[in-house]
Image (tube, helix red, strand yellow):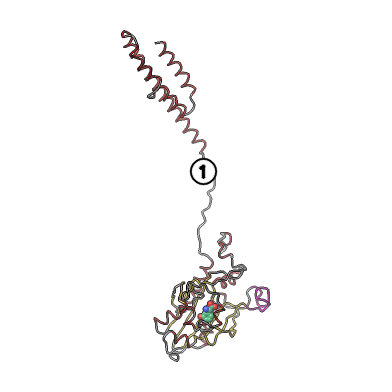
């Protein structure tokens, strides 16, 4: 009996000292667990004299209920404490202004690409696409650039195999479309192109828009009128435009098109190399050789083609002086457009 009393006393002082749920679990194991103090007392029941057994059993049961009750009570008190403390620790100030979520927006390259497309679509041009992994044949041969032609040096090509390249321009789509369709044709071809070239003014991938217009009676005057209209739409109607003789294997005659330098208004600066002009696209009358390659009779049709770099046009339109900004995707840059 004294033993049970002592056990009760020691439990009482221990349980009041417990301050955490983990300690309480230990205490519980020690007293009422399988190998706990209560169980061992129960086992010693057999050694209790027969006449004291009922009382000992009853007291032991009472003690067990007392201990279990105390533990339950202590547990809920500790849980309550725990909960209150967590509420305090996790308190948030709901009066603080929220952090703004930034909406994504269209990349400047895609914005200008959309503008270019919209202008040509408004003039009756349709959109076409072609493969970025292209046959040497379409990228070069069919555009009148044979294997040993020096014009191949104009473009540093990524070769996939002897006959397959990453297209270096969007011009191969001209031939792909002409192979499938007969004039009248009025198409533009926006897309990615690749060149083995990387420095401040060149990236291995960039965007071009190709254009092609073919019919029975297209002249250089049509080419001039259309491109002038396009440039005035894109850069403003006061933008000076000039056509400068040039050379491309797939056009004859060929012209490069310049706009008056938007940085110095034509007076000459570092960016226009003091010429007052900035080149923005290449163009020309489709070379009869290209018509032949596409399966058209050489005298059947006439037409013009042009090609422009979207990065370059975007830089000129917004006065951006470093091509790399387009690819870094720094939000401070992108949010300005
Ligand atoms: N393909 C040429 C290039 O990447 C650009 C070009 C020039 C396209 C003249 C044309 C054109 O269609 O007529 O440099």
The verdict on residue 266 being magenta is yes
Viewer-side residue, 94 vs 51: 51
Question: Which residue in the structure is indicated by mark 1?
Answer: 94
Tell me residue 31's x, y (percent). Answer: 41, 21
Residue for point 52% across, 37% down: 89
Q: Quadrant of the N terminus?
A: top left
Residue for point 44% across, 89% down: 301
In this view, the residue farthest toward the top is: 51
Viewer-side residue, 248 vs 222: 248
Residue 66 sits above or below residue 2 on the image: below
Residue 4 sits above or below residue 68 on the image: above
Q: Does residue 306 appear anywhere in the picture?
A: no
Residue for point 49% across, 77% down: 210
Q: On the rendered structure, is 202 left or right of 72?
A: right
Q: How crowded is mark 1: few (under 14 residues within 10 Å), some or many (20 or more)?
A: few
Q: Quadrant of the C terminus?
A: bottom right
Tell me residue 97's x, y (percent). Answer: 54, 48
Give the SS element for disc 1: loop
Residue 45 sits above or below residue 189 on the image: above
Tell me residue 18's x, y (percent). Answer: 48, 24
Segment colored magenta: 263-277
Q: Is the residue at mark 1 in contact range of ligand 1, meaning its CB lies under 8 Å from it?
A: no
In this view, the residue farthest toward the front is: 162
Residue 31 sits above or below residue 306 on the image: above
The verdict on residue 12 being magenta is no
Q: On the rendered structure, is 120 left or right of 238?
A: left
In this view, the residue farthest toward the bottom is: 299
Tell me residue 251's x, y (percent). Answer: 52, 85
Q: Does residue 102 appear anywhere in the picture?
A: yes
Secondary structure that dominates the magenta span? loop
Q: How many marks?
A: 1
């Amino acid at each position: 009996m004294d033993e049970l009393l002592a056990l009760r006393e020691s439990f009482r002082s221990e349980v009041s000292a417990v301050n955490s749920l983990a300690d309480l679990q230990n205490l519980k194991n020690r007293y009422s667990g399988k190998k706990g103090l209560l169980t061992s007392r129960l086992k010693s029941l057999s050694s209790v004299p027969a006449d004291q057994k009922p009382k000992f059993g009853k007291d032991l049961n009472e003690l067990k209920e007392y201990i279990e009750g105390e533990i339950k009570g202590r547990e809920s008190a500790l849980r309550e404490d725990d909960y209150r403390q967590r509420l305090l620790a996790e308190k948030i100030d709901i009066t603080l202004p929220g952090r703004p979520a930034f909406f994504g927006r269209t990349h400047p390259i895609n914005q200008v690409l959309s503008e270019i497309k919209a202008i040509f679509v408004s003039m009756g041009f349709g959109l076409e696409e072609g493969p970025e992994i292209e046959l040497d044949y379409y990228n070069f041969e069919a555009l009148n650039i044979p294997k040993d032609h020096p014009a191949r040096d104009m473009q540093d090509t990524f070769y996939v195999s002897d006959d397959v390249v990453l297209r270096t321009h969007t011009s191969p789509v001209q031939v792909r479309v002409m192979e499938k369709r007969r004039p009248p044709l009025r198409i533009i071809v926006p897309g990615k192109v690749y060149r083995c070239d990387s420095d401040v003014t060149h990236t291995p991938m960039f965007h071009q828009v190709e254009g092609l217009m073919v019919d029975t009676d297209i002249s250089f005057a049509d080419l001039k009128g259309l491109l002038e209209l396009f440039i005035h739409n894109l850069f403003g109607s006061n933008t000076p435009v000039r056509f400068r003789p040039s050379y491309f294997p797939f056009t004859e005659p060929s012209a490069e098109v310049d706009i008056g330098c938007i940085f110095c208004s034509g007076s000459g600066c570092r960016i226009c190399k003091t010429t007052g002009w900035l080149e923005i696209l290449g163009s020309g009358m489709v070379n009869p050789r290209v018509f032949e390659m596409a399966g058209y009779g050489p005298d059947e049709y006439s037409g013009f083609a042009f090609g422009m770099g979207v990065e370059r046009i975007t830089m000129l339109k917004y006065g951006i002086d470093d091509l790399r900004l387009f690819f870094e995707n720094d939000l401070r840059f992108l949010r300005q457009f």
